[in-house]
């Protein structure tokens, strides 16, 4: 029998001793996938993988340049390759680009081989977090907050196929990490 004490300190040993699926984080830009993923790393000893970084390595250029020079469709092809590479690893925490889970094949791969968490937040909250960051081409329009709202409406049906949904808006990073770790143990 396993006793779960609500403290992140016990998780490292517990996770190291168990074989669990990769933890996959999905959600919109600004939902905290990278921050939470990196924090999870400290508490699990898993490897952190960011599909956007795999895309940049494969393309040999930054995401913004892929969008500008090659276009979004090419970015999405790289992204699907990155998802395949990421999910083929073991003991990983995988942070996905916000649009990765929209694609049916990506979704199938991630859902069948990973433990998928949707980090849910409102457009107001997401906008507040990303408004000073110019690295997301999809938000370069006149009204990024409205774009985020439209993306929520378009993508949320798919995000809700995740195994778990965590409303991250009013939680601290550590509360989110605790919530995730309790659900995978
Ligand atoms: C995108 C999200 C970005 C990045 C690209 C496209 C999207 O990743 O993959 O700019 O389609 O939502 P983050 O969600 O990590 O910002």
Image (tube, helix red, strand yellow):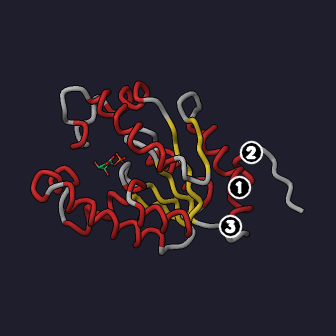
- Looking at marks 3 and 2 on the same chain, the residue that comes earlier in the sequence is marked by 2
Write the residue at 47% across / 50% down. Answer: 158
Q: Nearer the viewer, residue 72 or 18?
A: 72
Q: Which residue is mark 3?
A: 16
At x 40%, y 72%, the residue is 85
Q: Residue furthest right?
A: 1
Q: Which residue is depicted at the point 33% across and 57% down? A: 52
Question: Taking 28 as reference, is 180 left or right?
Answer: right
Question: Circle 3: is it few (<14), some (14-19), or many (20+) Cα within 10 Å?
Answer: few
In the picture, the quarter occupied by the C terminus is bottom right
Quadrant into which the N terminus falls? bottom right
Where does the image place residue 93, in percent across and percent down from the top left?
52, 60
Residue 131 tag number = none
Residue 125: quadrant of the picture: top left
x, y percent for residue 4: 81, 51
Task: Please name the residue that numbered disc 1 is placed on.
Answer: 11
């Amino acid at each position: 029998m396993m006793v779960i004490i609500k403290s992140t300190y016990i998780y490292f040993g517990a996770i190291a001793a168990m074989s669990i699926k990769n933890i996959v984080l999905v959600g919109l830009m600004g939902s905290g996938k990278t921050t939470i993923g990196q924090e999870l790393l400290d508490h699990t000893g898993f490897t952190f993988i960011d599909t956007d970084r795999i895309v940049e390595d494969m393309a040999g250029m930054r995401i913004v340049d892929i969008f500008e020079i090659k276009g979004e469709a090419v970015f999405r092809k790289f992204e699907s390759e990155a998802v395949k590479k990421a999910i083929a690893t073991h003991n990983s925490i995988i942070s996905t680009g916000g649009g990765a889970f929209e694609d049916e094949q990506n979704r199938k791969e991630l859902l069948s081989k990973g433990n998928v968490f949707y980090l849910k937040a409102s457009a107001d909250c997401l906008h507040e977090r990303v408004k000073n960051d110019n690295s997301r081409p999809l938000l370069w329009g006149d009204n990024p907050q409205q774009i985020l709202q439209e993306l929520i409406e378009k993508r949320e049906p798919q995000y809700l196929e995740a195994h778990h949904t965590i409303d991250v808006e009013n939680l601290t990073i550590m509360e989110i990490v605790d919530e995730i770790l309790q659900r995978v143990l």
